[in-house]
Every structure is written in C-alpha cells, then in structure tokens.
Image (cartoon, rainbow, N blue to C red):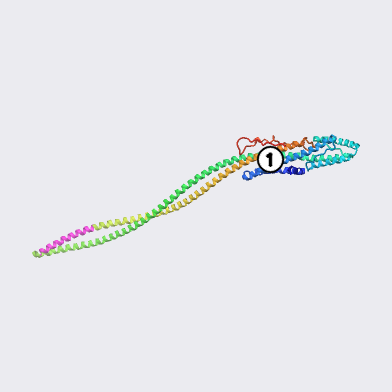
Amino acid sequence: MNPLSKFSNLRVWQKLTLVAVALTMPILMLAYLTIAGGRGEQSSVTAFVVILLGGGLAGWLMYAITRSVNRQTQSIRAMFEQISVGNIDARAEVITGDELGEIANGLNAMMDNMRSLIQSREERDRMQGAVMKLLEEVSGVADGDLTKEAEVTADVTGAIADSFNYMIGQLRMVIGNVQQTTRQVSRSATDVYSSAKNLVGGTEQQSKQIVSTSEAVEEMAGSIQQVSENAIVSAQVAEQALKNAQAGNSAVKNTISGMDRIRDQVQETAKRIKRLGESTQEIGQIVQLIDDIADRTSILALNASIQASMAGESGRGFAVVAEEVERLADRSTDATRKIATLVKTIQSETNEAVGAMEKGIQEVVEGSRLASQAGQSLAEIEAVSKKLAELISSISTASRQQARASEGVAKSMNEISAITQSTAAGTKNAALAVSNLAGLAEDLRQSVSMFRLPRTGQTEDGTSNSPRATRAGLDLSSMPNVGGNNKPKEAMPVTRF
C-alpha cells in the first residue's frame, strides 16, 4: 500500500503532530551538539543522521500535507464549479480520510439527497433557483475566500447551507492550523539555523584552540623527551659517581688498614729501640765496672813498681811486668772512656729516635683518624650517590612514562581536532537541511495563502507579522567554512512539489 494513502487517512491534528515531532528531532539534536560539543565522533555522526532524517521526514510530511490538502480542496472546488453551471450530478472525489474527506462525503451525500428531492420540473426549477442563490452566496469560496457563509433557510437548501457552513468552518480550522504550522516551522527553522550557525562558529574557534593546544602538547612532548634523555645521561653519571665513591671508600679502607699496620710496626720498632737504650745503659754499667777495674789495676801496677824498685836487681823483671800492666790499665781506661762516650752518644740518639718514633706514632694515629673520617665521608657520599642514582633512575622512568603519555595526549588532541572539524562540517550540512525545510514550509504557506480567513491577529494574507524564514532569509554564505577547503559551499537545491 502507498504510504501516502495511509498518511491521507490521518486526522489533520495528527498530521500536524507528526510534523511537530519531526521538527523537534533536529532541534533536540542541535541542542545536544551545542551542549556536548565534539565529545565523540560516533555520537556526532549519529546526531547528524538523526538531524537529516528528521529534516527529511518533516519535509516529506509537509509535502504530504500540501499534496493531500491541495488535491482534496481542488476536488471540492471542481465540484462547486460544476454545480455553479447547473450540473447537479457533479460529485467531489473523496481522496483523504480527514476532515476534508468527511466534508467531501457530506457534500456528495447532500447532492445525492438534493437530486432525489427534485421530482418535477417545478421542484427542479425551484431547487435550481435556491441552489443558484446558494452558489451566489458562496461563490467566493471557489476563489479561496473562506469568510463567506451561506444563509440558512427553511427550504431544502437550508440543510445544504448549514452543511456548507459547517464545511467552511472545518476548512477554516484546517487551513488556519496549516498556516499556523507553517509559521511555526519557519520560526523553528530560523531558530535552528541560528543555533547551527552559532555552533559552527564556536566549533571553528574550538578547532583553532585545539590545533594550538595540539602544537603546545607536541612541543611539551618534545621537551619531556629531551628531559627523559637528559635523565638517562644523569643516571649514567650518577651510577659512575657511585662506582667512584665505592672505589674511593675501598681505597680509604685499605689506607686505614695500611696505616694501622705501619702504626703497629712503628710501635714495635719503638719498643725495640727502648730495649736498645736499656741495653746501652747496661753496657755503660759494664764499662764503668771495667773502668774501675782498670783504675785498680793501675794502682796495683804502681804498687808493683814500688815493690820492684825496693827489691833492686832482683825485682827488675817484676818491674817490667808492672809497667806492662800499667800500660794495659791505661789502654783499658782509654778504651772504656771511648766506649762510655759511644754509649752516651747511642743513648742520646736512641732517646731522640724513641721521641721521633712516638711522634711518628702520634702522626700515624692522627692520619688513621683522618682516614677513618674520610672513609666515613666517602661512605656517606656513597649512600647519597646511591640514593641520587635511584632518584635519577626514578625520574628517568617517570620522564619516559610522561613522554609516552604526552605522545598519547598529542594523538588524542589530533583525533579531537578531526572530530571537531567533522562536527562543524556536519552542523553546516544540518543547517543546509534546515534551510531546505524552511523552503518547504514557505511552499506550503504559499499553497494555502490563496485561502482567505477571518482576522484573528494575523495579517490580511493570513500570515504572522514576524519575519518569515525563507531560502533568501537563511544566508548560508555567512556560515564559516569549517572542516573543508576555503571555498564556500553552495546551498543545497530545494525541491519544489
């Protein structure tokens, strides 16, 4: 079955409701795009599809309403033209199942009743006169003047006049609703176009900001990559410093061990020198004893010489022995004196050596203490270098992660920029669809403008004093061209029905 035939069977208010619903869909989708912006390419494409489908559905509904109203009214008008020339056999074709179709059915039934009532020529003439009068009263309806009403009389044409007046009232209501709907469609199309234009302008600005932000993010990613590389080099330097500190600490420990060994050896040497000094003192005592023995020997030699001289010739040999003993005693005395001098010299030098050894021991102890402090400092430096190496390694790892994250952010910003450009292009296409919808509404308004209605706050031609949204009124040339080349897009051609 033809969809138009199903649509024609709907009531007028049902048809207008469908048009309002179809118009509400693109308005809501544009509002959603205005609020949501470029959050997702899939949602933007879905919204644009819904906008285009809603605009197409609204255009199709406007076309169907215009076609059904025009066909039914033309059928009724043709019947009136036939009746005006005296053809009482004329009938209106029932095309729709709405109020206009009911009016056509009523007129056909009325003409059938009229024809059955005319039984004779006089009745026919009288009926024809009444009908001619009725037609004169309502002849303006054929020209679209819906302000005309037939006079209701008591004859057979009274029921016809009453039915006709009822039909005109219903037709006024239908045409009034259609005109009001076209005005609302025009205003809604203008509002939707304005919102779409603002959205495209905002999207263009957003696209520029996203491009600028993308460049900044890419520059930041390069800086973070450089920081990451520097952190890697710093980590290598810190690791080398840690190795050097460990080597220095090990060398200091070896130095401390060597100085401890030197101190022990110096202390042992000092002890031996002290023992040597003590031995020289014993040698001095022995020399002193030898010196005493030499003195006594010299005295004995002197006494022997005296005794030999007293003995005369018999004591001459003894005297010679006494002289030799005395010379030996003198030589012993000289030797002991030299030994005593050497012992004193050795004792003096030994004491000096012991003092030097003790001073050297103190220097070794002080050097060992300083080396121990240096070792402690190097140990602290090693610990700090180790922590520094760990910290720089963590910084290097974090920098690499930030570099990867910044690359992902830059990629996301580029995708968002592409989505924003696609959103702007789709929004402009939606604005073009709204322009076409406004053109269809204008076509419908012009189709029903031939009917004249009583004044109810509108202008004489039945339209509102508010600005009409026509194709010429929607200036698409001022729409910014986003997401495409620099050439302005041509307006989509409007199909006339």
Whole-percent x and y of residue 409? Answer: 56, 45
- Crowding at label 1, few (<14), some or many (≥20) Cα neighbours within 10 Å? many
**Is 20 included in the stretch rendered in magenta?**
no
Whole-percent x and y of residue 290? Answer: 21, 62
Left or right: 71 as drawn, with respect to 155: left
Q: Nearer the viewer, residue 428 or 404?
A: 428
Q: Is residue 287 above or below residue 120?
A: below
Is residue 39 visible to the viewer in this orientation of the structure? Answer: no
Residue range highlighted in magenta? 315-341
Q: Is residue 457 above or below residue 394?
A: above
Q: Looking at the rendering, which quadrant does residue 428 occupy?
A: top right
Q: Nearer the viewer, residue 90 or 148?
A: 90
Is residue 321 visible to the viewer in this orientation of the structure? Answer: yes
Left or right: 399 as drawn, with respect to 181: left
- If the image is split into quadrants, where does the N terminus sit? top right
Whole-percent x and y of residue 478? Answer: 65, 35
* Number of numbered markers: 1
Which residue appears at 48% of the width and 46% of the height?
Answer: 229
Q: Looking at the rendering, which quadrant does residue 494 occupy?
A: top right
Name the kind of residue labelled 1 in the image. Val
Whole-percent x and y of residue 228? Answer: 50, 46
Left or right: 411 as drawn, with respect to 139: left
Left or right: 108 as drawn, with respect to 309: right
Q: Looking at the rendering, which quadrant does residue 325 occupy?
A: bottom left
| Residue beneath disc 1 | 192
